[in-house]
């Protein structure tokens, strides 16, 4: 039974899964929403369930045969040059609702786009993680600088963290990611805080970080050891300054992670933790569509687990 992979042309994470599916002899159709409608066509008819065909320039797949859909990071829809702006906007919405909406009606996603969108809200992640038994940092979200300043004075060492991964652009060309950084009460006494929401958390003293990937009930964890002060605050600032080694997941944390995925209705998640000197794991966030291929030692296990999830479906209790 074939698997549908929805992502852009350059996606090393999806590449690893497709390689594993190919190794197993599982048919795969890889497509990008940017291919529709110029290089991808589809027809679907509802008769009890949706049935029809998706066709690219090289392959086709029957909707009723799809055993799993791997939703990664597709691009924006593309339309012919010269198409009027208002027509392009209308066609884009029709494509999203018609093409992606038809796929959304099919079962066995990893993860379903609607579940990804709902789970991306950091406040939802933090409160849900708490109810699932995971420790989270003391957190304030505000656009009132006086409240942020008071929080820092009461808590002590704090860190500012962006709540989205949207990069800033300079002149529409150079893009910059915003990283977490340690701040003081004086830093937070800034009227610019009133211009949008800001998240401030207690600084968690830690020996290292952990990236944990969950695929249904299977968990894979890797310790991340930072070699610089900047990467100790946010390891994404310099991947070359990191060292990795396998990590054992404490049973209490494993139980909390599985509860979190079930509560958020996710089959996959990439979770970040900090580990204190006492060995306690502190939850930071879950990315419902996170990457993992950059950790070479963990990539084969993740690819194998995701390929299995796409071909065999979720556990019976999901």
Image (cartoon, rainbow, N blue to C red):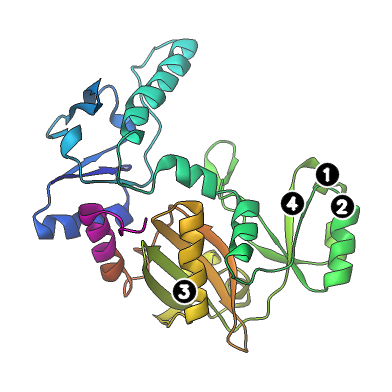
What separation in Å lies between label 4 and label 3 (alpha carbons)?
A: 30 Å
Tell me residue 162's x, y (percent).
65, 54
Which residue corresponds to mark 4? 198
Which residue corresponds to mark 1? 194
Q: Residue at x 84, y 57 (%)?
A: 148
Task: Judge by depth and name the residue closer to the eye, 110 or 184.
Answer: 110
User: Where's the C terminus, which quadrant?
Assistant: bottom left
Q: Secondary structure at mark 2?
A: helix
Which residue corresponds to mark 2? 145
Tell me residue 268's x, y (percent).
39, 57
Is label 4 in contact with label 3 (beta carbons under 8 Å)? no
Q: Earlier in the sequence, mark 4 or mark 3?
A: 4
Q: Secondary structure at mark 4?
A: strand
> Which is closer to the viewer, label 1 or label 3?
3
Looking at the rendered structure, which numbered label has been put on residue 130? none
Tell me the crowding category of disc 4: few under 14, some 14 to 19, or many 20 or more residues within 10 angstroms, Cα based. some
> Which is closer to the viewer, label 2 or label 3?
3
């Amino acid at each position: 039974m074939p698997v549908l992979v929805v992502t852009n042309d350059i996606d090393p994470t999806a590449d690893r899964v497709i390689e594993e599916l190919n190794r197993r002899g599982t048919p795969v159709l890889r497509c990008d929403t940017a291919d529709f409608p110029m290089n991808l066509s589809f027809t679907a008819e509802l008769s009890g369930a949706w049935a029809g065909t998706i066709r690219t320039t090289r392959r086709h797949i029957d909707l009723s045969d799809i055993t799993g859909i791997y939703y990664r990071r597709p691009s924006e829809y593309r339309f012919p040059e010269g198409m009027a702006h208002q027509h392009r906007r209308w066609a884009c919405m029709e494509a999203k609702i018609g093409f992606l909406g038809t796929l959304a009606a099919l079962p066995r996603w990893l993860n379903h786009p609607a579940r990804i969108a709902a789970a991306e809200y950091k406040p939802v992640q933090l409160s849900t993680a708490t109810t699932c038994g995971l420790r989270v940092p003391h957190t304030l979200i505000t656009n009132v600088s006086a409240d942020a300043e008071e929080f820092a004075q009461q808590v002590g060492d704090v860190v500012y963290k962006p709540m989205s991964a949207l990069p800033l652009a300079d002149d529409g060309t150079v893009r910059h990611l915003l990283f977490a950084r340690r701040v003081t009460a004086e830093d937070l006494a800034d009227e610019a805080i009133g211009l949008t929401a800001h998240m401030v958390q207690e600084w968690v003293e830690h020996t290292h970080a952990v990236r944990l990937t969950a695929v249904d009930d299977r968990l894979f964890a890797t310790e991340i050891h930072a070699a610089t002060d900047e990467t100790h605050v946010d390891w994404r600032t310099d991947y070359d300054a990191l060292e990795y080694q396998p990590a054992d997941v404490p049973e209490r944390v494993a139980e909390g992670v599985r509860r979190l995925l079930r509560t958020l209705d996710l089959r996959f998640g990439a979770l970040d933790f900090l580990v204190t000197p006492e060995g306690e794991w502190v939850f930071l966030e879950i990315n419902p569509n996170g990457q993992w291929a950059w950790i070479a030692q963990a990539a084969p296990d993740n690819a194998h687990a995701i390929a299995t999830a796409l071909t065999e479906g979720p556990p019976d209790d999901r």
